[in-house]
Amino acid sequence: MTTIPVIDFSKLDGEDRAQTLAQISKGCEEWGFFQLVNHGIPVELLERVKKVGAECFKLEREEAFKNSTPVKLLNELVESKKNGKVENVDWEDVFLLTDDNEWPSNTPQFKETMKEYRSELKKLAERVMEVMDENLGLPKGYIKKVFNEGDNNSAFFGTKVSHYPPCPHPEKVNGLRAHTDAGGVILLFQDDQVDGLQILKDGQWIDVLPVPNAIVINTGDQIEVLSNGKYKSVWHRVLSKPDGNRRSIASFYNPSLKATIAPAPELLVENKDIMKKEMELTGTTYPTFVFGNYMNVYNEQKFLPKEPRFLAVGTI
């Protein structure tokens, strides 16, 4: 069975550092996804996150989901006895946590726990970006600096809390439609018990099997651009399931909307003939653009191929 790399992050600090750097490099280059274990986030905190996440869904979200658009559309399709799938919706209950929006307030310890968790995840994201800098041969802190417009501390850090409730007809609706992520580095704390996340590799959908207390890392479109295509953002999706209630907490370390994104100068081939050949082989050239403009295009084209997004944003 093909499985995505599982990497012991603690070995970066020991005699296995070079080997661990190589594993992460391979994860970024060949997979676009890898799982980190021994990442430094206390297991006790992760257990609390699981607990408040489950309680929040039960207390504050589950009833509303029963009356949501996906449920209504699925019921209509089943009653009509038509074949096919429900289009343009996902079987997902979802809300976003940022530093300045309203959080669920009726679940005990939810705010305190998730604030602590987000602080730990942000630090982990910055460590992962430093490893990427090192592997790409960029100055330490390069990616963070680009995302923060220098030293402005303006990068966006958001946490998407999702649940995928049991679905009576999983073959008729997507848990989450296939897409690549728009932003920078994504850190996912997925369910230990209920699977469903898949990535597309070499034309095949591969399960991202749950590893207890691992953090799944994937690279978004902006890392692909900064790395000049060395690291690719990868198509992924979530299947709906007939049983279980899948928890998925994804945190996004994204550029500021005002940040200018372009391939790192160190990664541009200076010899124009080599560069021309490289462009012909990959079929992609990456423009320079402002991230906010990219998001405007992405919001319209999230579930479509990414290459036209790069082209479109290059003409803005």
Image (cartoon, helix red, strand yellow):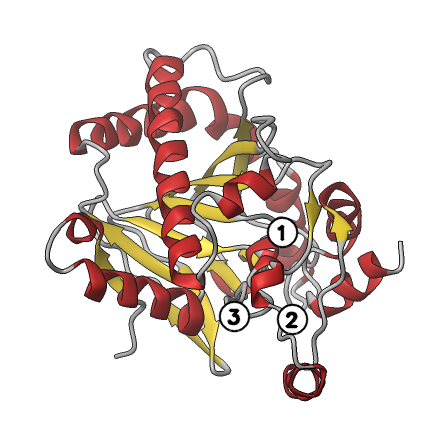
Could you say which quadrant of the image residue 308 lies in?
bottom right
Where's residue 28, x and y in %? 41, 65
Residue at x-position 33% and y-position 47%: 244
Residue at image position (27%, 66%) is 23
Q: Is residue 118 left or right of residue 316?
A: left
Circle 1 SS class = loop
Is 289 placed above or below 256 here?
below
> Closer to us: mark 3 or mark 2?
3
Residue bearing the label numbered 1: 182
Q: Is mark 2 on a helix, strand or loop?
A: loop
Q: What residue type is labelled 3?
A: Lys
Amino acid beneath label 2: Asn
**Quarter occupied by residue 101:** top right
- Front-most of residues 316 and 107: 316
Q: Nearer the viewer, mark 1 or mark 2?
A: 1
In the displayed structure, would residue 198 be above or below residue 274?
A: above
Q: Which mark is residue 230?
A: 3
